[in-house]
Image: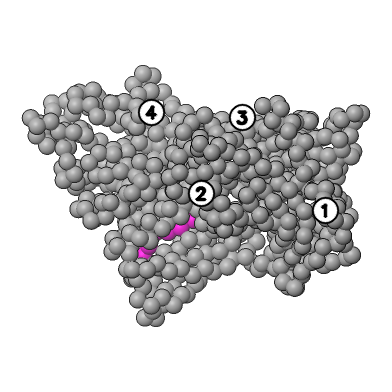
Amino acid sequence: MANRLLRAFFAIPLLFSADCIAQVIPLDVSGVRTGAVVAERKGDILIVRWPDESSRPWTAEFSLDPAKPLITAIRVGDKAIAERARPLYWCETGKRRGGWDAFFDRPFTHPEGTRRFVGEFQLRSAKARSVGDRLEVFFDGLRLGPFQGGIAFTFFPGSRLIQQEAVAATNEPDTAYFYDAGLRLTAEADRLAGWNMQSEVAYFDLAGTLRVERSEFERTPVKARHRAIALRTARGSIAAFPAPHQYFFARDTTQNLGYPWHSSYRGEASIGIRQLPDDNLPFYPWMNAPPQTQQRMSIFYLLSDQEPSAALQQTLRYTNHDRLPDLARYKKLATHWHFAYTVQAMLKGSDWTPPFKTVLKAMGIDAAMIMDFHGDGHPQDLTEVRLKELAAYYRAARAQSDQNFLIIPAEEANAHLGGHWALVFPKPVFWFMKRPADKPFQSKDPTYGTVYHVGNEQEMLDLIRREGGYAYQSHPRTKGSTGFPDKIKETAHFRDSRYWGAGWKAMPSDLSSLRQGLRALNLLDDMHNWGLPKRLIGEVDVFQVDTTHELYAHMNVNYVRLEGLPDFDHYGQVLEALNRGDYFVSTGEVLLPETEIKQGSRNEIVVRAEVTWTFPLQFAEVVWGDGVKTQRQTFALDNTREFGSAKFEWKVDARDWKWARLEVWDVAGNGAFVNPVWK
């Protein structure tokens, strides 16, 4: 490992090739409009000017001479915060074997192996263009293994946030990959005798305590809470952090693997973000790069003329301190958790507080729909063991539910109906997943009351109907639901109104789009074009968690419209609201407190929405279908500033539309959506 780190460190200078010709490259500024962020050329320098949230003037100077560092300086007023800086990229590539929606194909185990690349940058041309009230500068000349493209920087008016992206595509088929990124800048004031440095970095450790330490010679990862790291510069600091959800491809476990990194050497210091090749489990799918898609490999920087601790603290605002924000008249429901809670509670007692409760409450979750007996317990048992475990499940869920936190007991039953699917009842129900020939479907037990033995698909549906239960396809079209619900779309149980639809999660990962979870969103549109008014339920689908985990990166939540949080005996009220479709799904940074989708003129859809956000928004998308074809219209939101709220109205011409829905996404791939409304 040490040798590998050293090789990676010494390879960093290759990012800027020694073959660069010492001449100024062409610059295109024809796409720059007059506005809050402007660009101009002065000799061999491109200068970007913009105001921060306090209207202080900032400038970023880029060298157009390929022989020099790309970033000459970034200043607030006449104070240089960063000087002579170079963007850094690495990537590791492997091969998909199960298609783009595969989860278990483990690219790092492919017979062809994996390849590790250090980015090489030879500046060939530059282009600046206005994007709404923002400005993007793009520098062509990046080669990152099989990827070819350039490096872009986006500047946002009213903000000290800068987004750096490797914008590149590959022609190779079946490419799975992940990337590391960062920035290397001059730190001459930190140089000591020999190769030593006294550069300082700051981050929050896993307990949330601020740590300040001297940067190491090697590229050193840190297990940081909130995914951010800040470097002290000569006259301020710069914090680096990834897109809070988009950078983290789906996993079944959420241990903090140490995503930020730092290093310093011979008058230069570096910070950035990184991934690991694998986590020693078969559930590590990497990212997708379909041929010729423009992958946008992002990292964010927050600039400050204050201490690194101040810059770090300010980064927390973009994720509401990793807490799902409260919203009047809504409660936050997170579903699909495999905590093995019951088995542990049977050993420790119902008064034992499970770690997940502490974690989820701190994250702002009001209700958790957990799904025990998925690799734990005895769900297939046909004796009293099964009934005792169900009784313990309901007892433990009741014991740990209170006025501020509700546990809703459910199961990922996966019996009879096809693929993996979730089942939840509005009250405790005792049932067996199989029915021996000598057992009736329904019977009475002196201890447990009504007990069901379910032997087939029809009996499963009968049970759901009799007891007021609900079902949905978990992780549709992937994992254990590969091919589902498509294979069951004509069945009575899937077409029943008590089969809600499917789960949504940001899986798989494809950085060519800011829209997350396209696998499930595409299914949502398909289901409505099948003529079925189904819904997506936000689901997390992870196993054990504790306070040291990087859970927020994998979170989404259902904002369910409720005046108050019901107690355990009335948790069915939450299910009733879901059944009405009275909720929206969000990653937490974008919220949709109010939406209205209705018919305007005969072939017109009118959408009104109240939106709040942290990162600047990128676009809204109205999606609709006529029962055969899905269509969409995108509305740019690139004039929005960070930390805002507004009411919008969009109109689309949509001949013969039958249903429509709304999505809103920000610049970091965070978003929110509502399920379709029928005409």
Q: For this rendering, which residue is in front, 647 or 482?
A: 482
How far across and how far down the image is residue 601, in percent? 39, 81
| SS assignment at label 2 | loop
Q: Residue at x 82, y 34 (%)?
A: 265
Instruction: Say whether residue 226 is visible.
Output: no
Q: Residues within 10 Å of mark 4 (few under 14, many from 20)?
A: many
Mark 2 or 1, nearer chain start: 1
Residue linked to disc 3 = 207
State how far apart marks 3 and 2 are (Cα): 40 Å
Residue linked to disc 1 = 20
List the single residue furthest toward the bottom: 601
Instruction: Say whether residue 123 is visible.
Output: yes
Left or right, 482 with reference to 35: left
Q: For this rendering, which residue is in front, 165 or 429?
A: 165
Q: Are marks 3 and 4 in contact (CB under 8 Å)?
A: no
State how far apart marks 3 and 4 are (Cα): 24 Å
Residue linked to disc 2 = 174
Q: Main secondary structure of the magenta part?
A: strand
State how far apart marks 4 and 2 are (Cα): 39 Å
State how far apart marks 4 and 1 are (Cα): 60 Å
Occupied quadrant, residue 136? bottom right
Q: Which residues are magenta?
A: 672-678
Q: Residue at x 75, y 35 (%)?
A: 9
| SS assignment at label 1 | loop
Residue linked to disc 4 = 341
Query: Which three-letter amino acid code belongs to the residue tagged 3?
Result: Ala
Query: Which three-letter amino acid code belongs to the residue tagged 2?
Result: Asp
| SS assignment at label 3 | loop
